[in-house]
Image: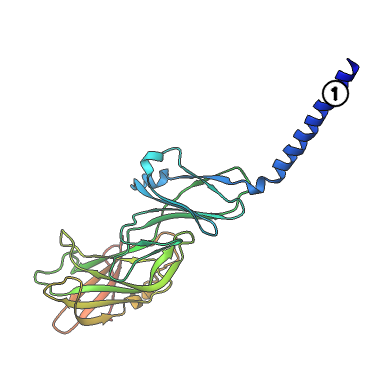
C-alpha cells in the first residue's frame, strides 16, 4: 500500500510539474498568437453608407471582403491579425477605382469615387482589439456654376476635363499616390455639372475645355487649358485635411474669354474672380 501511495504521489507531482511548464510556455509564446481585431462600422451606417469593403494587411494582404454594414450592425467584422504589425481599412463608395494590394487607383478617363475611408495601423500585444471605424471624406466635389445656375445655358457647346497629378491613394495611410488623373465633365441626367478630384499632394491641376466630337462626350478638340490648381491655391485649399472640402467653379464665357472663379461650397455666393 505504501508503495502504491508513493507511486500515485509521484505521478501527481510529475503532472503538476508538466502542467506548470506547459502553462509557462504558452504564456511566453503569446506573441506568436494572433490578435483578433473587430472593426465596428456603425458610424458608416450613421453617415448613410450601408455597404463597403473591409481590408486587412501586414507585410502582405491578409483578407479583403465586400460586406453589408447592416448585416454586422452592433457586432462588427472580426479578423485575426499579427500582434507586432497590422493594418485595417474600411472603404465605402468604391465604383470606378481599381483595388490593388494597398492602393486604390483611378485609370485615366475614369472619374474618382465619392470615397469614404477609415484606416488604422496598429500593433497590439493582446488577444482582442476593437476599432471604431470613423469614415473620412477622400474626394473634392467640384460643382460647375453658370451665372449662379448649376445648368449650362441652352446650346452651351463645351465640355470640361479635369487633370491632376495624383490618381489614387494608399487605403491604409490615406496618402495620395502620384499618377495621371483625367476625367471628363458634362451634364448629368438632370443637366447639372459635377466633377470629382481625388486627394492630391499639391495643386497640380488643369481644367481643359474642349468641343466634343459628334460621336463622343468625353473626347474632342481642345479649346482652352486653364490653371485650375492656381485658383485652388489662391483660396488656400488644404489637401491634407482629414475630410476634404467641396468647391464650386463659376464659369462665364463671352466671344473673347472664359473665366473661372472658386467659391466656397457652403458659402454665401461671394467669390473671387480668377482670370486664368
Q: Is residue 4 at least partly visible in the picture?
A: yes
Q: Which residue is pictured at 71% across the width and 42% down the height?
A: 27
Q: Which residue is pictured at 37% across the width and 75% down the height?
A: 234
Please identify the residue farthest to the left as the structure is shown: 155
Residue 177 is left or right of residue 121, and the answer is: left
| Above or below for 7 versus 110 | above
**Quadrant, the N terminus:** top right
| Above or below for 229 versus 49 | below
Residue at the disc numbered 1: 7
Q: Is residue 245 at least partly visible in the picture?
A: no
Q: Residue 273 in the image: x percent, y percent?
A: 27, 76
| Above or below for 276 versus 49 | below
Residue 26 is left or right of residue 196, and the answer is: right
| Above or below for 146 versus 80 | below
Please identify the residue farthest to the top as the structure is shown: 1
Residue 210 is left or right of residue 111, and the answer is: left
Amino acid at each position: 500500500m505504501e508503495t502504491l501511495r508513493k507511486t500515485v504521489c509521484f505521478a501527481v507531482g510529475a503532472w503538476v510539474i508538466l502542467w506548470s511548464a506547459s502553462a509557462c510556455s504558452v504564456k511566453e509564446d503569446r506573441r506568436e498568437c494572433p490578435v483578433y481585431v473587430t472593426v465596428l462600422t456603425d458610424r458608416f451606417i450613421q453617415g448613410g453608407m450601408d455597404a463597403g469593403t473591409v481590408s486587412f494587411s501586414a507585410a502582405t494582404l491578409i483578407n479583403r471582403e465586400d460586406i453589408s454594414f447592416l448585416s454586422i450592425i452592433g457586432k462588427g467584422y472580426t479578423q485575426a491579425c499579427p500582434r507586432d504589425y497590422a493594418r485595417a481599412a474600411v472603404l465605402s463608395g468604391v465604383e470606378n477605382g481599381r483595388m490593388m494590394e494597398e492602393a486604390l487607383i483611378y485609370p485615366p478617363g475614369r472619374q474618382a469615387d465619392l470615397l469614404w475611408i477609415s484606416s488604422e495601423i496598429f500593433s497590439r500585444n493582446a488577444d482582442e482589439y476593437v476599432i471604431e471605424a470613423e469614415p473620412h471624406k477622400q474626394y473634392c466635389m467640384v460643382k460647375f456654376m453658370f451665372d449662379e445656375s448649376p445648368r449650362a445655358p441652352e446650346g452651351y457647346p463645351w465640355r470640361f476635363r479635369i487633370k491632376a497629378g495624383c490618381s489614387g491613394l494608399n487605403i491604409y495611410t490615406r496618402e495620395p499616390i502620384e499618377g495621371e488623373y483625367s476625367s471628363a465633365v458634362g451634364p448629368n441626367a438632370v443637366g447639372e455639372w459635377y466633377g470629382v478630384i481625388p486627394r492630391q499632394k499639391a495643386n497640380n491641376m488643369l481644367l481643359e475645355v474642349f468641343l466634343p466630337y459628334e460621336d463622343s462626350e468625353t473626347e474632342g478638340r481642345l479649346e482652352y487649358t486653364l490653371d485650375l490648381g492656381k485658383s485652388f491655391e489662391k483660396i488656400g485649399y488644404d489637401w491634407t485635411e482629414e475630410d476634404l472640402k467641396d468647391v464650386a467653379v463659376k464659369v462665364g464665357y463671352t466671344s473673347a474669354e472664359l473665366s473661372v472663379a472658386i467659391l466656397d461650397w457652403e458659402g454665401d455666393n461671394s467669390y473671387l474672380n480668377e482670370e486664368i
